[in-house]
Amino acid sequence: MIDLILGGARSGKSKLAENLALSCGQPVVYVATATVEDEEMRSRIAQHRSRRPSAWTTVEEPLFLADVLRREAAPGRCVLVECITLWLSNLMLMHSGEHFDEQRGALLELFPK
């Protein structure tokens, strides 16, 4: 099953996703796409880290999300991606967007048609 949680900035999307992952009863892989660009983001990342259970596996990957999902997504495992919006921003801003089309396509290939 794939759930997509949408909402405004700081509307509780992360906490909702984390609660769903906690309640699923499966091992959780938390894929973090954020990068530290300023003190505000450093603080937000620290808050997210402090809420994460120590049993969760964390993978930090700002660009190559499809590679991580191919490697980590498996039956009996919950994968939480935090956050698609930041991942898209990273693709557009890092390396002058050279990876955007390739990585967007790679992610879309992973979803059922």
Image (cartoon, helix red, strand yellow):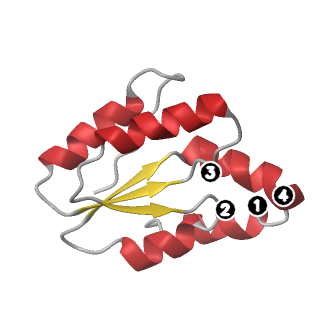
- Whether residue 75 can be seen here: yes
Residue 99 x/y as whole percent: 78, 66
| Residue at numbered disc 1 | 100
Q: Amino acid at mark 4?
A: Gly
* Tag 2 and tag 3, C-beta contact below 8 Å: no
Q: Nearer the viewer's eye, disc 2 or disc 3?
A: 3
Badge number at residue 87: 3
Judge by depth and name the residue closer to the eye, 110 or 37.
37
**SS at badge 1:** helix
Where residue 105 sits: x, y (%)? Answer: 66, 67
Seen at 34% across and 40% down, the residue is 50
Q: Is residue 71 left or right of residue 90?
A: left
Rounded to the nearest angstrom, the CA distance separating label 2 from label 4 is 11 Å
Instruction: Give the spatial CA distance, label 2 vs label 3.
Output: 10 Å
- The residue type indicated by label 1 comes to Phe
Rendered image: mark on residue 104? 2
Q: CA distance from mark 4 to mark 3?
A: 12 Å
Cα separation between marks 1 and 3: 10 Å
Between discs 2 and 3, the one toward the N terminus: 3
Give the residue type that dot 2 points to. Arg
Q: Which mark is residue 97?
A: 4
* Residue contact between numbered discs 1 and 4, judged by CB atoms under 8 Å: yes
Which tag, 2 or 4, sits closer to the chain's start?
4
Q: Position of residue 102 (x, y in %)?
A: 73, 70
Q: Do the CB atoms of the residues marked 1 and 2 lie less than 8 Å apart?
A: yes
Cα separation, mark 1 vs mark 4, equals: 5 Å
Residue 10 bears which disc, if any?
none
Residue density around tag 2, few if under 14, some if 14–19, many if 20 or more, within 10 Å: some
Disc 4 residue crowd, few under 14, some 14–19, many 20+, Cα 10 Å: few
Q: Quadrant of the image for the N terminus?
A: bottom left
> Which secondary structure, mark 4?
helix
